[in-house]
Image (tube, helix red, strand yellow):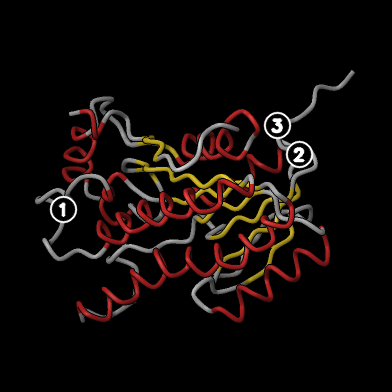
């Protein structure tokens, strides 16, 4: 007898799937039996079992088409992982215009979740079930370290907005059997943090901010997302799951 996988028969949309936490979620969720639709603004290179759709989550028409394409193929959307995100360091290449950077960070990190959620919730309402997982950050909970950035860094307020959007959505859609939760990772070893961690002295500072003395791994955050996507978390909604090596406990 084969044991049932944790996401058998479920359909999962994962945004920001090309790298980092999003890519780890794609691989883990697929291994746990889910039908995966991976989407990213950049071209992806997963195996042929993964449906890959290049799309910009900040564009309403592209998001609507993405959702419709999924429904045509799978008839349902059970799980969404809103992992698409940028930092002020990689929001817009080759510019120091702080207002343009601010707008782009807010557009991807907050508006992108708003747009995807707007269309997905209507689908999940008819299904009377679903799980939405939003990637926030510990920087939406605590202030950004003085040693690493400016006081006007748009990343922390964008992630604070994700947490509040998560709570508001959770309150309004729980009656339809839809759960909405956020994950707040600490500093994770991904391409997004590479420009910080390439410098060994800066990396050491960041590591020491975590009581566990190291950066997290994308796979560790994906494991948390798997829990929130699965029926094991059936009575959890509106929460912020900290995956931060003790960062916020200090």
Q: Farthest residue toward the top?
A: 1
> How many C-alpha atoms fall within 10 Å of the one at disc 3: few (<14), some, or many (≥20)?
some
> How many C-alpha atoms fall within 10 Å of the one at disc 2: few (<14), some, or many (≥20)?
some
| Whole-number angstrom distance, CA of label 2 to CA of label 1 | 40 Å
Q: Residue at x 69, y 76 (%)?
A: 65
| Whole-number angstrom distance, CA of label 3 to CA of label 2 | 7 Å
Q: Residue at x 28, y 50 (%)?
A: 140
Relative image position of residue 76 (x, y in whole percent): 77, 56
**CB atoms of marks 3 and 2 within 8 Å:** yes
Q: Is residue 42 above or below residue 169?
A: below
Q: Place residue 200 in its image quadrant.
A: top left
- Secondary structure of residue under mark 3: loop
> How many C-alpha atoms fall within 10 Å of the one at disc 1: few (<14), some, or many (≥20)?
few
Relative image position of residue 157 (x, y in whole percent): 25, 60
Q: Place residue 93 in its image quadrant.
A: bottom left
Q: Residue at x 32, y 62 (%)?
A: 87
Q: How many marks?
A: 3
Q: Farthest residue toward the right?
A: 1
Relative image position of residue 150 (x, y in whole percent): 12, 62
Q: Is residue 43 above or below residue 189?
A: below
Residue 59 lies left or right of residue 35; in this view the side is left
Relative image position of residue 147 (x, y in whole percent): 10, 50
- Secondary structure of residue under mark 1: loop
The residue tagged 2 is 33
Q: Residue 148 has which mark?
A: 1
Which badge, 3 or 2, comes first in the chain's sequence? 3
Query: In the image, which is nearer the foreground, mark 1 or mark 3?
Result: 3
């Amino acid at each position: 007898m084969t044991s049932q996988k944790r996401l058998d028969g479920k359909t999962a949309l994962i945004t920001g799937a090309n790298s980092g936490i999003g890519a780890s979620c794609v691989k883990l969720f697929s291994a746990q039996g889910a039908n995966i639709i991976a989407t990213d603004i950049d071209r992806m290179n997963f195996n042929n079992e993964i449906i890959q759709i290049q799309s910009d989550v900040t564009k309403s028409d592209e998001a609507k088409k993405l959702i419709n394409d999924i429904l045509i193929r799978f008839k349902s959307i059970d799980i969404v992982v809103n992992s698409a995100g940028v930092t002020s360091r990689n929001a817009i290449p080759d510019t120091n215009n702080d207002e343009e950077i601010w707008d782009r960070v807010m557009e991807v990190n907050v508006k992108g979740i708003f747009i995807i959620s707007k269309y997905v919730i209507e689908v999940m309402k008819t299904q009377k079930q679903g799980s939405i997982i939003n990637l926030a950050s510990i920087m939406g909970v605590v202030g950004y370290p003085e040693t690493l950035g400016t006081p006007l860094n748009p990343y922390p307020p964008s992630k604070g907005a994700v947490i509040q959007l998560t709570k508001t959505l959770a309150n309004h859609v729980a009656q339809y059997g839809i759960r909405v939760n956020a994950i707040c990772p600490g500093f994770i070893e991904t391409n997004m943090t590479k420009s910080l961690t390439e410098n060994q002295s800066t990396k050491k500072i960041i590591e020491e901010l975590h009581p566990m003395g190291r950066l997290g791994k994308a796979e560790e955050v994906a494991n948390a997302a798997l829990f929130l996507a699965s029926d094991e978390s059936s009575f959890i909604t509106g929460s912020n799951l900290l995956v931060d090596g003790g960062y916020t406990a200090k």
